[in-house]
């Protein structure tokens, strides 16, 4: 439904611009409330909900710090959404446009990244890193963008090796220390353990037969079980089999290829940067989907569907603009 709606909604450049500014504004508001939770504290009803379930509190309380979730469902959804919004805002700041807008987008990106750091979601850091790498590779011939990229890479290196030891920075560093990540080893062992089930069920057990939903259906559904798929791709393999997994990976690959081709073929400079604003975070999100269920969480699934629609519509919009000129 969302895909169909977006296909008809994106009928001119103004609609793309308004929608992009809408979700960046939403990300900014959500990040500001997350910063409020971090420095002022949780509201009474939020803290009651947080402590009502001991397991929930254990998951949210890491390294002596309660993970922030702002107005969203959980810290993971909060971190990934701000990673998408912040990256998009940063690319708009680097792209074409008046200096005032560049400053506004850059400020918004920094605020969103700052708020994201309190989510405790390491996958969000990896998502930003992958998105920026794609953007740099796509602009190796643009001196101005290369200089801005060099500044960003320098800041990243300083944060990684500098004498800074706050909780968010340590969490970011641990994102890229795969060999020392105990949780990653546990997830790898889980994937190996469930491989036999995936091989013996080429079309899977059916939708919602894994995770919490699978536990609820396990008594009435013969293929449902108490599988705990941390990875979104593992969940797809369990529910739709290795055939469904190949379809999903193929779809994501085609979308990324289409987005990159759009970026190099679109003539209008604004539509060109909008193509990268959506496809770069989408690539990061697709990779993040390996470690957790990233692509289909709310509200980021709305941006995923918008990306799929835009990869189809942007080229048509560009042809219309070129024809009018």
Image (cartoon, rainbow, N blue to C red):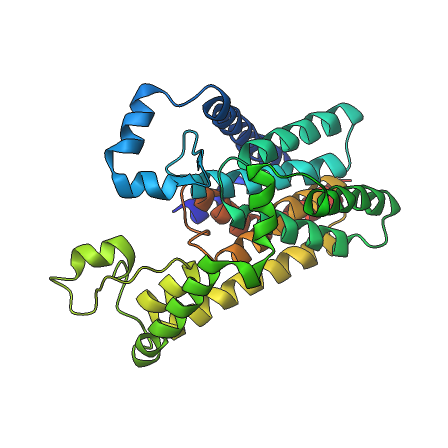
| Residue 43: % across, % down | 36, 20
Residue appearing at x 26%, y 69% in the figure: 205
238 w.r.t. 125: above or below: below
143 w.r.t. 21: above or below: below
Specify whether residue 41 is in view: yes
Residue appearing at x 46%, y 41% in the figure: 63
Residue with the most extreme right position:
143
Residue appearing at x 68%, y 27% in the figure: 107
| Residue 162: % across, % down | 72, 43
Residue with the most extreme left position:
220
In this view, the residue in front, 80 or 273, is: 80
State the image quarter where residue 89 is shown: top right
72 displayed left or right of 317 = left
207 displayed left or right of 230 = left
In this view, the residue in front, 38 or 236, is: 38
21 displayed left or right of 271 = left
Quadrant where the image shows the C terminus: top right
Residue appearing at x 48%, y 38% in the figure: 119
Specify whether residue 11 is in view: no
In this view, the residue in front, 269 or 244, is: 244
């Amino acid at each position: 439904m969302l895909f169909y709606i977006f296909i008809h909604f994106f009928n001119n450049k103004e609609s793309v611009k308004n929608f992009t500014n809408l979700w960046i504004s939403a990300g900014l508001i959500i990040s500001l409330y997350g910063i409020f939770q971090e420095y002022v504290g949780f509201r009474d009803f939020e803290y009651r909900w947080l402590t009502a379930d001991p397991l929930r509190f254990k998951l949210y309380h890491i390294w002596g710090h309660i993970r922030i979730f702002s107005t969203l469902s959980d810290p993971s959804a909060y971190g990934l959404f701000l990673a998408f919004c912040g990256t998009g805002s940063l690319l708009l700041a680097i792209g074409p446009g008046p200096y005032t807008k560049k400053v506004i987008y850059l400020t918004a990106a920094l605020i969103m990244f700052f708020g994201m750091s309190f989510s405790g979601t390491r996958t969000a850091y990896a998502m930003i890193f992958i998105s920026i790498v794609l953007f740099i590779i796509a602009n190796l011939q643009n001196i101005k963008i290369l200089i801005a990229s060099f500044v960003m890479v320098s800041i990243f290196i300083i944060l990684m090796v500098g004498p800074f030891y706050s909780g968010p920075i340590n969490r970011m560093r641990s994102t890229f220390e795969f060999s020392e990540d105990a949780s990653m080893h546990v997830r790898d062992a889980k994937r190996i353990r469930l491989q036999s089930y995936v091989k013996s069920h080429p079309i899977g057990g059916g939708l919602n037969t894994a995770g919490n939903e699978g536990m609820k259906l396990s008594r009435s559904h013969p293929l449902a079980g108490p599988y705990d798929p941390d990875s979104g791709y593992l969940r797809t393999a369990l529910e739709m089999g290795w055939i469904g997994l190949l379809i999903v990976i193929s779809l994501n690959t085609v979308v990324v290829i289409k987005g990159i081709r759009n970026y190099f073929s679109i003539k209008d400079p604004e539509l060109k940067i909008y193509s990268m604003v959506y496809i770069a975070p989408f690539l990061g999100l697709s990779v993040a989907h390996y470690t957790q269920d990233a692509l289909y969480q709310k509200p980021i699934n709305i941006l995923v569907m918008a990306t799929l629609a835009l990869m189809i519509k942007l080229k048509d919009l560009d042809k219309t603009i070129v024809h009018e000129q």
